[in-house]
Image (cartoon, rainbow, N blue to C red):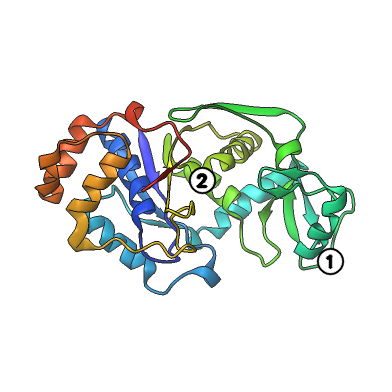
Amino acid sequence: MIGRFAPSPTGPLHFGSLLAALASYLEAKKSQGKWLVRMEDLDKPREMKGAAEDILRTLEAYALYWDGEIVYQSKRNDLYQSALNQLNIDKRTYACSCSRKEIQDSAINSQIGIEGIIYPGTCREKHITKTPHAIRVKTLDQNISFEDIIQGHVTQNLAKQIGDFVIKRADGLFAYQLSVVVDDYLQGITHIVRGADLLDSSTRQIYLQDLLGYQHIQYAHIPAAHNQQGEKLSKQTLAQAILAKDASKNLYQALCFLGQRPPADLSAEKTEQILNWAMDNWNINKVPKQKSTEI
């Protein structure tokens, strides 16, 4: 088994990030597998200076030690371009010059999907050559299904629920869906444990895996943590950074959130003792089968 944790360096780690890191770490280590860390730093305009180094220091403070070298997506554009070239050759893509406003203005005649307006395919047959333009992948009117270890059976029809989606942005940056699929394949990732806020991305990633001839991955989506206002913990909702001095307390609370029911006296132990207990007792089947839970 090879698992991974792939944060974006747009700010420090918060409790929601810790849940994904801890669950993916324990699932890999319980099976004597490897746990890799990848820095998803493609979106340089959103990156916070020093955040990548801070994230790594925090993982070490929480005794979440990774295997191998850190992979930085910003250094792998040639690999993403190679995958895009393959999709272009296979005629799976097309250029799109639609602005966000143009797509928004088409809402009257467009369907609404699980992430908002379904792109109506305006540029699909236009053979756009002017720049700047994005690159979209053509979706098919067929169901894509998989069994999530935690959330159970998941089915989506990309054409009807998502639409043709962007894999390279008009500003030249490779989109999340393509880069993550390429990296997971090249790093040999077999299991992905992450927040349920990314559950709807999984079918797009499976679709790209199929188009590129990659093997499928086993997914497990833990509940996303939300605050009292119902907002998912994130940098955008100003989630507080987790501190090194609170490692034992936060690890204990994370195990409780993940349904592992650690003994009360464990909360007073050192970080290493808490993790040792967690590795001995980790059971992913105890994780609540919910998409979101309040902390």
Residue name at image x 68 percent, y 50 percent = 85
Does residue 107 appear anywhere in the picture?
yes
In-image side of 273 versus 150 (left or right): left
- How many numbered circles are shown? 2
Dot in front, 1 or 2: 2
Going by the numbered disc 2, the residue's amino acid type is Asp
Of residues 123 and 76, the one nearer the viewer is: 123
User: Residue at the front extreme?
Assistant: 228
In the rendering, which numbered label is found on residue 130? Answer: 1
Going by the numbered disc 1, the residue's amino acid type is Lys
In the rendering, which numbered label is found on residue 64? Answer: none
Residue name at image x 24 percent, y 52 percent = 250
Q: To which residue does mark 2 refer?
A: 197
Against 248, is 279 above or below? above
Of residues 256 and 145, the one nearer the viewer is: 256
Q: Quadrant of residue 135?
A: bottom right
Q: CA distance from mark 1 to mark 2?
A: 35 Å
Earlier sequence position, callout 1 versus callout 2: 1
| Location of residue 120 in the rendering, given as x and y in whole percent from the top left corner | 83, 48
| Location of residue 93 in the rendering, given as x and y in whole percent from the top left corner | 75, 47
| Location of residue 90 in the rendering, given as x and y in whole percent from the top left corner | 74, 40
